[in-house]
């Protein structure tokens, strides 16, 4: 540890608190997950994961979470843009509405969305006209995850957007750039790291989301069953090692994906001289 | 490439930013828009650039009406007070930007872009920074890069909004001289906004003095300093003593002051006059017979010159009063040393030049001797 004088003392103390908190709250539970899964041995782990129903659940969970996060990436940017740049009436109100999915019990969101998007619901009726069933399909899961994930993108992009120097846009147009060029070359690059963060947060949340999804998903094995539900099912069957193995696998995959996003972020930072 | 502004007016909810501005700028001029903050100078510049649009009036560039044209079509280079460089692009890419965003048919080939950018970076003497990013540069370097970026598109007009406002004093002085030289080299019609009169005098060939959305005076730096058209210009440009009182044949009476006018003074009596005297237009003479005798109150050494505060001399034994009007006189270092003035001393003064305005009259009634 270097003995450099810093403005705020207490490096040792804050490091201690951090290590303790991370150990108690994150590392030890994760370690328990690993040891519990290890009870099955490699063969057992493989057997659990290779099950067709498990694989299908992984496919559903990752594809819906990815699709929802991707959609939130665009919608979140647009929403943040409107909130920051346009003089809306009752802006504060709109602004707090964004955070509502955070505060609402997820089960409530799930039930409301199911009621709305069921084939005879207010909105589901319209989709049914076009032969499109929303509730009880992966599409319904995606909609629930969009609802849950939107605030992550909006809230990470908003502060960066607020701090952008608007004169840079004026400079860009004065140099002859079109609106699209100004957006693509001047506005977007500084937002990319924040967008990636928002994306990975929304994606991670989508993977783990349970309450809002199980109602609208219909939970048909092989079709609309998500990984968290499968874990709960295994638990109800007292198959604890099986549940931990699935949990661990889903964690590992999510971790790798987040690592990739982080790497992408580092790369854009380096490329744009912010290192 | 000339700029003509005709009766430009712009109002915001509660104040008038531009109040019928008429202005003509000739091809190749370097003109300063000078005025206090909120006088409308930046609004005028941004309207000429096409970043803001006036409520009424016209803007002609080279005789063509461009009032409603967006900035992209005006071929102006704009330099911002806070640089507005693209922080996520290297210095090279910043300068290349204007060339890269051209439609494909007009875009120069990559080799040509490289050549042009390095040429411009050489011009601003910063080619060695081409691979750096703007946040790694000093303020002065950033502003020079911003200028190179604006020049890359070969603008017909260069508009600069307080270009040196965010820099420290030394860098500012250096960049002023540098801007002048650059203009002599390129001869692009240039208009810059400043609130610093020294900067305007030093850099511009013509100065437009603005106040409260109107143009007070347009002229060369000398003309503006020597023959200000309005009381505002008199006080805004350079330091000046202002006295209020009555003009009489041969002298001016104000409170405790009875200042003899220089030769050719007025012969008529006129009340309610504001008289403006520059500190260096007053001469100190050790002569008991001069009609105007003063007491030296304070001496402030300012380096190359001395500032001396004087009050009307009172009779022997009469104490100076706190409410005596002070006149400020400025002497060169040599003149001060030659006189060897002392505080409290009684000396005579002669006024060499002054001008006056009727306090409530229209600016046209200004007179000077």
Image (cartoon, coloured by chain):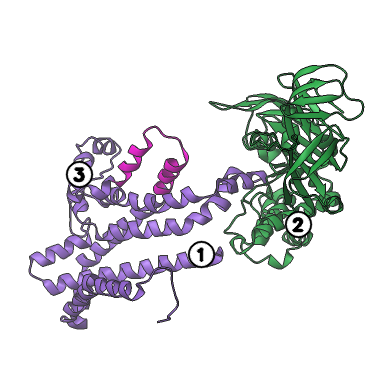
Chain colours: A purple, B green
Left or right placement of residue A229 versus residue B331 in this view: left
Q: Which residue bears the numbered disc 1? A: A269
Please name whichever residue, B174 or A89, is drawn nearer the observer in this view of the structure.
Answer: B174
Nearer the camera: disc 2 or disc 3? 2
Span highlighted in magenta in the image: A75-99
Q: Which residue is mark 2?
A: B174
Q: Residues within 10 Å of mark 3 (few under 14, many from 20)?
A: many
In the rendered view, would you say A170 is above or below B15?
below
Q: Which mark is residue A230?
A: none
Assign a secondary structure to mark 1: helix
Q: Position of residue B193 (x, y in %)?
A: 70, 41
In this figure, which residue is indicated by the disc labeled 3?
A114
Q: Is residue B96 visible?
A: no
Give the position of the N terminus of chain B as an image quadrant: top right
Q: Residues within 10 Å of mark 1 (few under 14, many from 20)?
A: some
The disc, 1 or 3, on the residue closer to the chain's N-terminal end is 3
């Amino acid at each position: 540890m270097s003995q450099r004088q810093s403005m705020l003392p207490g490096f040792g103390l804050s490091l201690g608190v951090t290590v303790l908190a991370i150990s108690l709250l994150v590392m030890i539970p994760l370690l328990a997950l690993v040891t519990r899964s290890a009870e099955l041995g490699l063969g057992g782990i493989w057997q659990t994961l290779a099950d067709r129903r498990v694989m299908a659940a992984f496919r559903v969970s990752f594809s819906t979470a990815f699709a929802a996060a991707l959609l939130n990436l665009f919608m979140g940017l647009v929403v943040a843009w409107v909130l920051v740049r346009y003089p809306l009436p009752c802006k504060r109100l709109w602004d707090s509405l964004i955070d509502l999915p955070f505060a609402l019990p997820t089960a409530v969101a799930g039930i409301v969305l199911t009621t709305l998007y069921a084939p005879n619901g207010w909105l589901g009726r319209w989709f049914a006209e076009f032969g499109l069933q929303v509730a009880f399909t992966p599409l319904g899961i995606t909609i629930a995850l969009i609802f849950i994930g939107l605030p992550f993108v909006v809230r990470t992009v908003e502060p960066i957007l607020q701090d952008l120097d608007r004169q840079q846009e004026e400079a860009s147009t004065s140099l002859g750039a079109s609106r699209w060029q100004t957006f693509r070359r001047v506005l977007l690059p500084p937002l990319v790291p924040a967008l990636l963060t928002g994306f990975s947060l929304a994606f991670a949340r989508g993977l783990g989301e349970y309450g809002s999804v199980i109602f609208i998903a219909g939970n048909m094995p092989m079709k609309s069953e998500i990984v968290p539900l499968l874990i709960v099912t295994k638990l109800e069957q007292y198959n604890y090692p099986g549940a931990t193995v699935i949990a661990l696998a889903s964690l590992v995959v999510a971790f790798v994906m987040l690592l990739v996003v982080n790497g992408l972020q580092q790369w854009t930072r380096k490329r744009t001289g912010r290192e | 490439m000339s700029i003509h502004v005709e009766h430009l007016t712009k109002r915001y909810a509660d104040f008038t930013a531009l109040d019928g501005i008429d202005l003509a700028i000739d091809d190749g001029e370097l003109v300063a828009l000078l005025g206090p903050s909120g006088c409308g100078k930046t609004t005028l510049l941004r309207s000429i650039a096409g970043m803001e649009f006036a409520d009424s009036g016209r803007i002609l560039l080279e005789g063509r009406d461009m009032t409603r044209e967006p900035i992209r079509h005006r071929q102006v280079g704009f330099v911002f007070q806070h640089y507005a460089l693209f922080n996520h692009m290297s210095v090279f890419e910043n300068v290349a930007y204007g060339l890269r965003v051209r439609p494909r048919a007009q875009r120069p080939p990559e080799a040509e872009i490289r050549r042009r950018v390095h040429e411009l970076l050489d011009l601003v003497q910063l080619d060695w920074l081409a691979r750096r990013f703007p946040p790694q540069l000093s303020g002065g370097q950033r502003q020079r890069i911003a200028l190179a970026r604006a020049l890359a598109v070969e603008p017909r007009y260069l508009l600069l909004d307080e270009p040196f406002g965010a820099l420290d004093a030394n860098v500012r002085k250096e960049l002023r001289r540098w801007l002048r030289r650059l203009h002599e080299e390129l001869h692009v019609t240039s208009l810059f906004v400043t609130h610093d009169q020294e900067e305007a005098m030093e850099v511009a060939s013509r100065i437009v003095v603005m106040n409260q959305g109107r143009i007070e005076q347009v002229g060369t730096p000398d003309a503006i300093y020597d023959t200000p058209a309005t009381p505002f210009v008199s006080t805004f440009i350079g330091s000046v003593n202002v006295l209020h009182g009555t003009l009489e044949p041969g002298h001016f009476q104000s409170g405790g002051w009875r200042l003899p006018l220089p030769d050719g003074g007025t012969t008529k009596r006129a009340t309610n006059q504001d008289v403006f005297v520059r500190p260096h237009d007053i001469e100190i003479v050790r002569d008991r017979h001069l009609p105007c005798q003063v007491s030296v109150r304070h001496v402030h050494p300012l380096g190359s010159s001395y500032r001396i505060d004087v009050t009307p001399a009172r009779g022997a034994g009469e104490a100076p009063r706190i409410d005596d009007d002070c006149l400020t006189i400025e002497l060169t270092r040599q003149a001060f040393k030659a006189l060897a003035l002392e505080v409290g001393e009684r000396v005579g003064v002669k006024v060499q030049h002054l001008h006056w305005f009727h306090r409530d009259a229209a600016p046209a009634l200004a007179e000077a001797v």
